[in-house]
Amino acid sequence: MTSGLQFDSAGRLRHLLTIEGLSRQTILEILDTAESFISVGEREIKKIPLLRGKTVVNLFFEASTRTRTTFEIAAKRLSADVINLNVSASSANKGETLLDTIRNLEAMHTDLFVIRHSESGAAHLTAQHVPAHVNIINAGDGRHAHPTQGLLDVFTIRRHKGSFAKLKVAIVGDILHSRVARSQIHALSTLGVAELRVVAPKTLLPTAVEKLGVQVYTRMEAGLEGADVIMMLRLQRERMQGALIPSEQEYFNLYGLTPAKLALAAKDAIVMHPGPMNRGLEIDSAVADGPQSVILPQVTYGIGVRMAVMALIMGGSAEPAGGRRQA
Amino acid sequence: MTSGLQFDSAGRLRHLLTIEGLSRQTILEILDTAESFISVGEREIKKIPLLRGKTVVNLFFEASTRTRTTFEIAAKRLSADVINLNVSASSANKGETLLDTIRNLEAMHTDLFVIRHSESGAAHLTAQHVPAHVNIINAGDGRHAHPTQGLLDVFTIRRHKGSFAKLKVAIVGDILHSRVARSQIHALSTLGVAELRVVAPKTLLPTAVEKLGVQVYTRMEAGLEGADVIMMLRLQRERMQGALIPSEQEYFNLYGLTPAKLALAAKDAIVMHPGPMNRGLEIDSAVADGPQSVILPQVTYGIGVRMAVMALIMGGSAEPAGGRRQA
Amino acid sequence: MTSGLQFDSAGRLRHLLTIEGLSRQTILEILDTAESFISVGEREIKKIPLLRGKTVVNLFFEASTRTRTTFEIAAKRLSADVINLNVSASSANKGETLLDTIRNLEAMHTDLFVIRHSESGAAHLTAQHVPAHVNIINAGDGRHAHPTQGLLDVFTIRRHKGSFAKLKVAIVGDILHSRVARSQIHALSTLGVAELRVVAPKTLLPTAVEKLGVQVYTRMEAGLEGADVIMMLRLQRERMQGALIPSEQEYFNLYGLTPAKLALAAKDAIVMHPGPMNRGLEIDSAVADGPQSVILPQVTYGIGVRMAVMALIMGGSAEPAGGRRQA
């Protein structure tokens, strides 16, 4: 899947399909824009008229109330109209259905598709077929990518750690099935961190994961040693085929983030999780709700980051100052 | 469940969880505010900008299209953005799920949660955990309370009967399973009526129901004698465990409100029902659609009462005059 | 089902239930109004304040994401608030449920019901019971009618063919189960075309279909001969009881629109389909995506036609000029 598809002929970001191929400068532009949108959520009137009269379609072929809600809130705060479509992906010829659905929606003069699909490449396939005025955000495709999650994660790190260059970052858990991990790795590699580690049992590591430029740890204690940022992943129970983990209890013992394991990291390490959490499986509640957790701030930043991506790709000025005039 | 949770340190209503513990003055303030909102529904442009830029989340763990719709309409008439979430309550650890869901939504800077849940106390539990800027309305929790229904019911009585002091009021039907009945009893006790009766077969009466300050009747004819207000309840078929009623036909014969039974009440008695009705079970269509029925006006008033509660707890001026300037 | 119900005492269109009984002048007024709305979809800000403060209820007793979406987009572009209700039609007494649901919604001071129901006559039944200020659009009732589809189809023909008088039009496929076909036949008969043909196997033709003023063909090649407009129907697999077609492959061989069969029609014939298409069953992808297809323009026009119908029956000026002032 080529990332070139994301840019128009002038090199402007037109779709957000994957973080792969985004320059450091583009990522930083998104993060800076997000900073300016975060404050909108703190205003008395949390609405700016940037996308007034635009139609945003949340097109979810895979159910996800949480993610859909964040995009719906982000779009409404930008004053767009939002259409929610939950489409069963059970029909025989899925590709056909996807493209016919997209063509119909774009014939209705809708402006932005936020697409989640269980098949890797669904958002790319769509992007290959839409006309110039339609924008696409990939809200998760199969095991491939979940770029707005990756962006809000690096936004969170910058907010809490300032700069990236000296950080040791550990991504822990079900790397194999995780589109979130792929997006995180691409974002952090591009921004440049001192050390980027992945920590998982062998059965949950993709083959040749080292080629992504990460250091691989199968013992969690070693992987957490001195880490400044710990990014936990959700154990994708529903995607596990066969016995990839011994038992949930044993998984928790070996790879669950407990206060004892957290103590091995840097004293001021932050703990992240994309949610929803399996408490007591990949993370102990004492850590999830503890002082080093930035899990809820991640959710808050997620709204601002999604507003920023929508504003940038839809070509409105990323400057929310216009918002001071209320529509 | 303490009702003190509903007020902030200055004694201002912050959440609406239950009518229990609300003062007569607070209830009357809500009813008076509702009066001023009723007219909004009759305008050409049924919208006032009181909650513009606020995000209202309808968080329904128990399906209810009707109730959700009334809150959605009320919020949109106040110009709020509305997010509808239907959450399956089937997950293993429900309390955990509820609180994690709430924490995530409040991290998105949402302002008001309208919560319906099959477990008594769900709205209270939530209220104990939200920060100061978040408000909660209980839209029905288990068998416990459904306060906006109770408020719209007393609003209806005041509209049609003027004052409460001399009224004989009969609540008829499945008292045992009814959160509506509990809310009605608390509202009418606080406002003060001449006689408050409950009418039901023994199997559908809570133990020690007399302690709520009501007179108990198991014969419907005696319970309706001279009543000014008859408040029918929906027979909660879906909540009945075991054979609490002999047969639907026999229930209708004994406790269904027919024209003949209605004739025992005061000549100008009004008939109420919270809906949806089981016609031919707890109420005869001749009564439901007859001249003494105020069942549809209840629905109309329900929008105004919900707008009033939202306006009051979210701290906007309860004075909808601001609405005359259209946004 | 009388069509008189659609007009108020002054002869103004109040509901759109069926095309049957609409005058040529009324149909042309709707098409002309739609022309003026089409441009709204092409503006930077696709929104006009014509129905601001009105509440439109999409009341779907039969699931249809596509049709619901077109009405939702049309209503939002007119600045109305939209409430989506998907009601299971599985309850015992459907008529009762429908009317109680309608009465409750109208008590909430909603303004327009867009109704889809699996039973023929559902929208008519509703129209008989609503007060003067409520308007109704039939979005498909059983096998009876789907008038906005019929209107957007004749809009499409006028856009691409200019005038109706000299056209040969062939409607092809499952005429028996198709409410779309009925609405198309009424619209085209009223507007007047040179020849109106229906093409189907005998098992998919209604009895006495000739009485509708159409010419009947059971051989597709003969039916397409020299046709200027080919209107394909969706094969309603889900409505077929018993073996009305031999096999899907044989159906495609006999009645599927292929490039070879299309070559029998006029050289500049246009191909239409109401969607969603069964590709490879009633239509070949080479035709569906080919140069003579106007299937996607139909979708675009559908938004403008639905906006026009809403604007006309809700009594706002059909003149969207007011929209130039943005709310």
Image (cartoon, coloured by chain):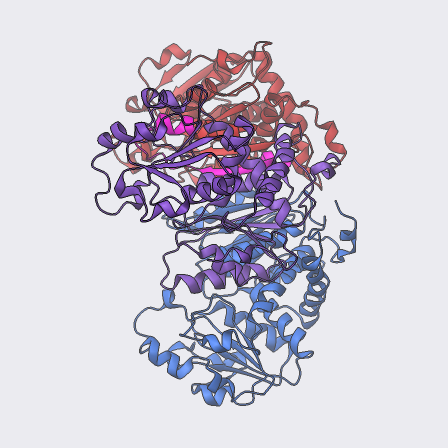
Chain colours: A red, B blue, C purple
Residue A271 in sight in this render: no
Residue A166: x and y, percent? 55, 14
Q: Is residue C10 left or right of residue A248?
A: right
Q: In this view, does A173 lie to the left or right of A271?
A: left
Residue A127 against residue A118 in the figure, above or below: above
Closest to the observer: A144 or A110? A110
Find out whether residue A201 is within the magenta segment.
no
Task: Please state the total of marks drawn on the protein image.
Answer: 0
Q: Is residue C228 left or right of residue A297?
A: left
For the point 70% across and 57% down, which residue is it?
A: B40
Tell me where the magenta segment starts and ends, as one range: A73-100
Residue A286: x and y, percent? 46, 40
Image quadrant for the N terminus of chain A? top left
Closest to the observer: A167 or B17? B17
Residue C100: x and y, percent? 49, 64
Residue A21: x and y, percent? 49, 12
